[in-house]
Every structure is written in structure tokens, then in C-alpha cells.
Image (spheres, grey):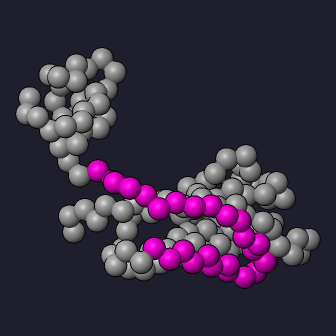
Amino acid sequence: MADYGLRISKTGTDVKTGDDDDMVLTSKYSLFKGVLSGSGSATVNSGATTTISINHNLGYIPMGHVFIKLPSDVVLLPTDVYLELPQPFVATGVEVDDYSFKSTTNTMSILLYWEDLTESLSHIHISYQYFIFLDKGKL
């Protein structure tokens, strides 16, 4: 085994003799290093897209993860867990949902669209969490 630094093996595999495929993590390969993170909430009006812009100013398009938590008013999806974006476009007889995010060289934008087709709710409040990874990697 060559000396690569950090290795974590899968259950039942000796970290000293296991192959790279038997590792959960090995620093032999590029790993995401560092992260910008944050959270907040937004009011999303029915029938309109709400855009949350986060400035990262990294000068390249980073890898990111975004999660949202829906309010209890929205009963078609779980409301007690954070859902990873992008979520698929969903249309039912009650509502239309579309949640996604995109990154540029300087910003990450979280796009939230919700429409109540029954016109009983004019808006909802959505909580979000984001993680922007700092390792540029090999492009």
C-alpha cells in the first residue's frame, strides 16, 4: 500500500490491505475541501418564482448542494425533512411545484416556484440550506 494519507475502509475490510474500491474515503483522489454554507427562509407567492441569490465570488462554477423544507400547509410532500434539490416538477390538481438551483462563477441562485391551484393559499414559507464546495477540482 502506498502512503496516500487518509483512508477509511468499508465494514469488514482491513484499511491497510484493502483496495481503493473497498474504501469509503481515500485522500489518494480529489475530495471536496471546504465549504461555504448558510440557511434561511423565503416567502414564495403563489404563481411566482422566488429567487434567492448567494454571492460566493469564487471565480469558477462550484459544486453545490441545496435542501429545502416545505411548510405543513403543503401536504403532498414530507414536511419534516429537508429535500435535496433539484426536485422534479410536480403538478397535481392542487398545486404546481418546481424547485431548483444553479451556479455561476460568482453566485448560486435558488429558484422556488409554487402555485396553489385552489387559490386558498396566497403564499408559503420555505426554509433552505445550502453548501458550496470550495475545491475547484480538475476541470
- Which residue shows up at 8% across the image and 33% down it? 2
Q: Which image quadrant is residue 122 in?
A: bottom right
Instruction: Please give left or right for residue 48 compared with residue 13 in the image.
Output: right
- Residue 18 or residue 136, whichever sits in front: 136
Residue 76 quadrant:
bottom right
> Is there any visible trace of residue 46 in the rendered image?
yes
Q: Position of residue 108 (x, y in %)?
A: 49, 74
Residue at image location 68% in from the left, 68% down from the top: 97
Q: Residue 43 at what x, y percent from top left?
A: 77, 72
Query: Where is residue 121 drawn, in percent x and y?
Result: 88, 71
Residue that protrudes farthest toward the left in the picture: 2
Residue at 70% x, 61% y is 127
Horizontal arrangement in the rendering, residue 113 relative to residue 11 (left or right): right
The answer to if 43 sits in the magenta stretch is yes
Q: Is residue 102 left or right of residue 2?
A: right
Q: Quadrant of the C terminus?
A: bottom left
Camera-side residue: 100 or 16? Answer: 16
Instruction: Please report the bounds of the magenta region as a residue range.
Output: 31-56
Residue plotted at (61% across, 68% down):
99
Q: Is residue 93 visible?
A: no
Q: Which residue of the protein is positioned furthest toward the right in this rendering?
A: 120
- Residue 103 left/right relative to 33: right
The dominant secondary structure in magenta is strand
Q: Quadrant of residue 1?
A: top left
Q: Residue 113: percent from the left, percent from the top?
A: 68, 74
Asked whether residue 30 is drawn in magenta, I would say: no
Is 102 located above or below residue 17 in the figure? below
Q: How many marks are shown on the rendered structure?
A: 0
